[in-house]
Amino acid sequence: MTDRNDAPPPERVFRPLTLGPVTLRNRIFVSAHTTNLGERHEVSDRLVAYHRERAAGGVGLVVTEGLRVHPTSLKRPEALSVWSDDAVAPLRRLTAAVQGEGAAIFAQILHSGREAADDYTRTPSWGPSPIPWSRGAAVPHAMTTDEIDELVDCFAGGVLRAAAAGFDGVEIHLGHGHLLQQFLSPISNGRDDEYGGTPANRARLVERVLTRTRGLVPAHMAFGVRISAEEFVDGGLGVDVMSQYAAQWASRYRLDFVDVSHSAYVGGPSLSTQMADMSHGPAPFAHLGKAVRDRLPDDVATLLACRIDSLDVAEDVLAAGCADATAMTRAHIADPGLNRKHRGGEVVRRCTSCNQLCIGRSSGGLPISCVVNPEVGLEEAWREAYAAADRVVTGGRPRLLVVGGGPAGMEAALTATRWADVTLVEREPALGGALRTARALHGRSGWARLVEDQERTCRECGVELRQGVAFDAGLLTAEPWDGIVLATGAVVGPRWSDDRDPVRCFGSGVPDPAGVRRAAVHDDRGGWEAWGVVAHLVHHGVETHYVTPLQSLAPGVTIYSRLGLLAGLRASDLLHVHLMTTVSGWRDRVLTLRASLPDTETAVADVDALWDAGVATPAAPRRLPVPHRVVGDAYAPRGAGWAVYSGRLGALRILADIRHRDDPVARSTAQRGLDADRRVAHVVPGRTVKIWFQKHTIIGRNPWLDETYPRHATAMLGDRADVTFVGLPGAVYDDQIPADYVRFGQIEVFFSWYFASQAVKAERAGYDAYVIGTSQDPGLAMARSLVSIPVLAYGETAFTLARTHGLRFGVVGFIPELEEALTANIRALGLADSCVGFRYLEGGRDLVTSATRDGRTDALAAAMDEAATTLRRTGAQCIVPGEGLPNEMLWAAGIHEVGGLPVIDCDGLVMLTAEMHARARRLRVWAPDDDSYDTRRAPDEVIDRMTEIFSPGGGRW
Ligand SMILES: Cc1cc2nc3c(=O)[nH]c(=O)nc-3n(C[C@H](O)[C@H](O)[C@H](O)COP(=O)(O)O)c2cc1C
Ligand code: SF4
């Protein structure tokens, strides 16, 4: 397989694919991956946002991370489960979000078996036999036959819950060395009952689970399995056996797909194949897909994963007949917009296959992130941070200087170009900083991708790149910089300053093996910096002594890479390891080593070169006369992922520094809004209320208005609630405002239906309240029948407020035809006596249209004043704006009184009321009655049938 830049545009990957009853829009999918973004084993807002982003990027299918079916597999609270019915409603939010973006979503159903043992639950793990997954791991409990029965029931329960949650399909996990594979494989199954011994007995549990679950999957859902086609363990399952099983199961259980992966969860190199890192070439296990696919019936699709990290490679895999669809999982962690960007010719941020912040963090129990994409798992928070930056930068574009062209500097530069004119200076002729060395090491070339992608983006975003230019006082004063980002990296120096033989430090250049027969590497960190050098030297045939005071090997390299790395080095016979040892002398090519347990000294002769971790000292000047931020290694040397993250954050922070240069209080307030990570850290789960505010206008038509509504929401609710403003679809009308459409009851029928169906969407997407933000309250009664979240409406709340305070109100509007609809609403509320009448603005339509365009409200306010004065004379005690647009304009102009009467800010009021109702519901101040005519819920299948028959255009909501 090749990873070509000059390949013809991929075409097969974009063809739809049918998996039984489900058709995917293309053949790229995101396979299951544990994110640790769950909360209390349930889907969280962050997880919904994470997958929504990937679905919006254009993949055909998202498979959830393994949903655990039983308490013995729960692991940490961030892992998801389908063990209880409580999981269903949150999962529904996830399915709705992904389906809403046009992708299908399958649930992966999993029991992880013997490797699930965890301090968190204190639950012994289950396995077929008391054989731990690796040396030193906990011994699992060998399952009894009753427990096996219980497990089969739990898989069945998981599938039923997945169906209830609206998934398009289920994938039973038979691979990756999890429980079902543990039963299947001779390496983990030592039983002598009907579940062990012969291959047929070992397959019995898998077959019971498939028999039971297949029968429960509704006809509209796809059903398939994930397998490890190779365990890569001596005596384990191989591709011949697994492809036979796959073919048998495909026919017997009417599988719609087989998702082909590989590896077993064992303490050996097999584990390092599961997410092949940058030491592997592209699509290293495509042959497994081919072997399985060749045996499957034609109507059963083969899905394939592993380091298919560009669309060109995916195209090759499909063309070679190795699969019908390809996972690009880490590729989509790195860049969720990959498909869309590829089609639009934009720069894709490519996965480096470093395995550092995705699986590296996940296996450490942390939420996943990504070295090249700091937004992972913080999608909403970064969106808000960018919006905050939009508000910070007003007026002209500041001039920003970025010093240093490593990953931190380039990230800062390319991020800042959205708001600033950016110049980047780099002392060296080439960009990339410390990654220039890292990418040149054997097996580490994946780093080139980050450097290339950042550099290309900088160029395409218009960053002025000045390479080979040093930063000095002249540069500082030569041009009027508004702010500076210092990304000057760290200087790594030797830790000895006596007259020993010369020591080379990591990062000070690519290790040159020429003339080196024997070398030593002295390291006290245990990460890739050292192990990259070791692997490079060994690859070039250098006998290498690895010396470390640490107690274990490569603790800074994720187990998913470490076990393969060490196995490869062991096979070379060139590596000698000295644990708990330091270099105590180095003179005349003799290396003296001091071991701490026991305390002994030994010598290694004829050592030609010593590489040492050295001491990294940040290299940023302390004070500068203009606002400045220090990012990346210059702030604290911590590797590429941190450099990219801090570069992006630094770009936002410097904007606030520049804007509020002389006002430290305003500056620190602005910084709070920009800090995506802290924003997440400070969110108390369940504290923020999410409100969907549905409007008649079209988002994007009136930039001034689009900007006013969110400001209004912030002024009303601060950070107590997030209000999302949603308009009508753009095709509904061509005008700037909907005035010519809302005047017909006939058209209002469609709007009412739409407003009501949007309430369903809002509820399914996890909103706490739904607002109908337009005075005639279209679809209000329908929406209340359809959803259980509070539904509030502009007209109803405003009229009721007047009544609550015993005030007679008059309505001032600009669309006279609405009077009939509003009068009917007022009557229905029993408030006819409180309404003194209606008045319309002279030339109101034009006044509102022009004010909507530029936000100038003087003429509108004058006309409102006149109309309100008339109403006051007829007895009105307060004014209700007859439509949302004038209401918004008055609020934006700070006008709270017209014609001598208070004017009700109906938009503000309805937002506040929605928040209050949502909170009241949360606190059980009220609970929805589920047994009245409007709130009683019909069976799902009836609803589905009605939706199918009656929805405009048919199909789902
Ligand atoms: C962070 C992370 C977590 C994963 N968790 C799961 C999982 O829960 N279930 C599963 O079947 N595979 C899991 N995988 C494996 C992926 O589905 C996929 O097979 C692997 O990443 C190789 O594909 P890629 O090169 O396209 O990333 C995980 C992978 C990653 C990176
Ligand atoms: S952390 Fe590395 S391997 Fe993981 S998705 Fe990001 S770039 Fe790819």
Image (spheres, rainbow, N blue to C red):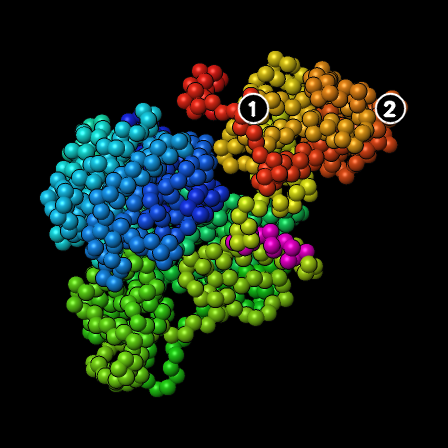
Q: Nearer the viewer, residue 812 or 638?
A: 812
Tell me what residue is drawn at x 56 percent, y 53 percent.
Answer: 682
Judged left or right of residue 769, residue 114 is: left
Which SS type dominates the magenta stretch? Answer: helix
Q: Amino acid at mark 2?
A: Gly
Residue 213: give x, y in percent of width and height.
28, 33
Q: Nearer the viewer, residue 153 or 703?
A: 153
Quadrant of the rendered image containing residue 927: top right
Residue 950: give x, y in percent of width and height.
47, 16
**Residue annotated with mark 2:** 875
Q: Is residue 37 above or below residue 572?
A: above
Residue 678 included in the magenta stretch of the image:
yes
Q: Nearer the viewer, residue 756 or 648?
A: 756
Q: Which residues are magenta?
A: 666-679
Q: Quadrant of the N terminus?
A: top left
Residue 909 visible to an observer of this rendering: yes
Mark toward the viewer: 2 or 1: 1
Tell me what residue is drawn at x 39 percent, y 83 percent.
Answer: 497
